[in-house]
Amino acid sequence: MNEHTHIGKFIVRCVFSLLIVIAIFAAIEWAVRQVPNTYRYKFEWMEKHAQDVEVLVMGNSHTLFAIRPEYINGCVFSLANVSQEWDQDLSLLRQWDTRYRKLKAVIMPVSYYLWLSVGLENTSEWHLCRNYKIYMHSELYPTLSKYNLEISEPKTTRNKMGQFLASIGKTSPPSEETYKVLGIDSMGWCSLYTPQLKHLLAQDFDAEAGNTANRHDSRCDETRLAHNYEIMKQVAQLCRRHGARLILVTTPQSQAYIRHLKADRLKTIQAATERFCSENGALFLNHMADNRFTDDDFFDGDHLSDIGAEKFTKLLNKEIEGIFSCSSYYN
């Protein structure tokens, strides 16, 4: 047997081994994509109901936990997700741009860091961006990238693989009850933050609020203001095309959280918000320091509990009703 034969056999074995490895990773990728998740649910809901939706709640965990669509009049759905930023909001709004028929309002959060945010892709939570590409079919990220692979982040892959293995033998497709277990109701609101869970976790409220404020501040970069302002201008343009009102909302925050925020950053945020509303016809409802909310209404320093969310959404609904009743509603 000559040297060329040995080399040929070695190459064949290498190729065969490589194919096995690829097959294993492909199987893992397929398996974790079968695990139910809230992004898929929200995409599928919009696919069915985009033409009927009247109010869309966008944004991050502040709106995800604080705004309960069931307490707002009309067909209301929450497209908010944890750590979602304005880039993702715009991408999602564009996803069904040609199908809106009844859209009256889009609610966007103005959280402490959003005007100056470095972008979700540039944080330790970058892996959340995969959900927009894989499960919501967003064009924000390239197909050939880490954002289109579950296995690009090992920790979440292991967790989902465990869920997949635990579900083997359960042949029924995901139902509304499945998503309730994941923490969202039929209209996209997240119901996980209850007083009972707050008591069970027994966190140091003030310390946690301070840590969160510092983490949010670390996501700020003054040079990003122009980019984020342009993203919001495009959101406003989309709203105008549909005759919908763009409503900016800062949800209630605890005093424990607020006192850790930087005063100069707050001034920058306030100035940017006022300028944007003036130039783009948006409305700003600022409930950050709303004294009608006490620590008992919060799950943690910057998130309302389910009870606080009910209280806030009922107040917000009255404000929205007032906006709709104005003769200048349509642009």
Image (cartoon, grey):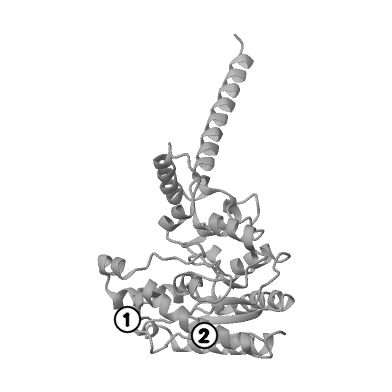
How far apart in space, not on screen, are marks 1 and 2 (Cα)?
Answer: 23 Å
Task: Compare residues 312 and 62 and report the one nearer the observer.
Answer: 312
Mark 1, Cα crowd under 10 Å, few <14 / some 14-19 / many 20+, is some
Residue 170 picture quarter = top left
Image coordinates of residue 254 in percent, x first then y, are 37, 82
Residue that protrudes farthest toward the top in the picture: 1
Report crowding for label 2: few under 14, some 14 to 19, many 20 or more residues within 10 A (C-alpha).
some
The residue indicated by pointer 2 is: 318
Q: In the image, 13: left or right of 193?
A: right
Residue pointed to by mark 1: 295
Question: Closer to the camera, 317 or 125?
Answer: 317
- From this viewpoint, is residue 273 visible? no
Name the quadrant containing residue 290.
Answer: bottom left
Please state if 14 lies on the left or on the right of 171 as rendered. Answer: right
Name the foreground residue: 90 vs 183: 183
Where in the figure is residue 30, as x and y percent of width and height?
Answer: 54, 41
Q: Quadrant of the N terminus?
A: top right
Tag 2: amino acid: Lys
Q: How many marks?
A: 2
* Circle 1: element type: helix
